Amino acid sequence: MKMMKITQGVGADLLNGKFSAAGKLPVSVCDSYKAGDGIVGPDRVLPLANPSALGFDPLRLQKIDFICAEAIAKQATPGCVALVVKDGQVVYEKAFDTWGTIRKSLFIKRRSMTWPPSPRSAPRTMAVMKLVDEGRLDIQKTLGDYLPWTRGSNKQGLKIWDVLLHQAGLKAFIPFYKETIDSSKEGIPLPGIYAACRTACTASGLAEICISAAIGGYPV
């Protein structure tokens, strides 16, 4: 059973491109599986392509090098891997710098695994890219162009491009929790929301306040 789980895990990793197949049988097992037989897969899942053939300007792609170098120089990140894919083909892929103060001896490689700082950012960005490719979204338009409930508010004119780049002027942090505490008593939790033990009533009370604030009950 343990060996089966290991085999299944390795097989899944192979299909996901985490490594390339290179093993071959050292001896013959039967007529169908002889010594030397094996599956030798490609070194990468997505093939490399000429950027120009897919409509990219190679000089513009080189700007990614400078952006990554600047981010590392300003200590915004200890290192990074940049990847540009179009139509299932890789037109740009590079790794930059080392792990910095974590382990200076370990260089970041194209397949280095890192902890994602924001699990929501990657799928959100890919969803936006897909909508743009399909012509269903224009990131140069505003929230008001796509979200009717923002019209008439101070969010209506925010450009989607600026929102994606975190430069739309929105508050970085909104302390919703302050609505659930008594500020006149040194931050004591309000008894109508909190309790000494967890109950369905108190849980729903806190959720209602958070949801109300999130949908526009409080200025953002």
Image (cartoon, helix red, strand yellow):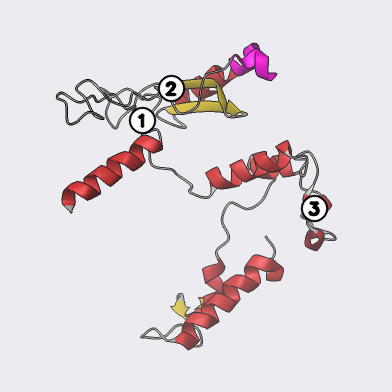
Q: Position of residue 142 (x, y in %)?
A: 80, 47
**Can I make out residue 36 in this image?**
yes
Q: Which residue is mark 2?
A: 95
- Extreme residue toward the left, this view: 27
Of callouts 2 and 3, the N-terminal one: 2
Q: Which residue is mark 3?
A: 146
Alpha-carbon span between mark 2 and mark 3: 37 Å
Please say whether residue 52 is one of the residues in the magenta stretch. Answer: yes
- Main SS of the magenta part reads helix
The image's mark for residue 112 is: 1
Alpha-carbon span between mark 3 and mark 1: 38 Å
**Can I make out residue 167 in this image?**
no
Left or right placement of residue 149 versus residue 210 in this view: right
**Kind of element beneath mark 3:** helix
**Kind of element beneath mark 1:** loop
Mark 3, residues whose alpha carbon is within 10 Å: few (<14), some, or many (≥20)? some
Range of magenta residues: 50-62
Instruction: Tell me the residue at 45%/82% (across/down).
Output: 194
Q: Amino acid at mark 1?
A: Ser
Please say whether residue 212 is one of the residues in the magenta stretch. Answer: no
Q: Position of residue 177 (x, y in %)?
A: 52, 70
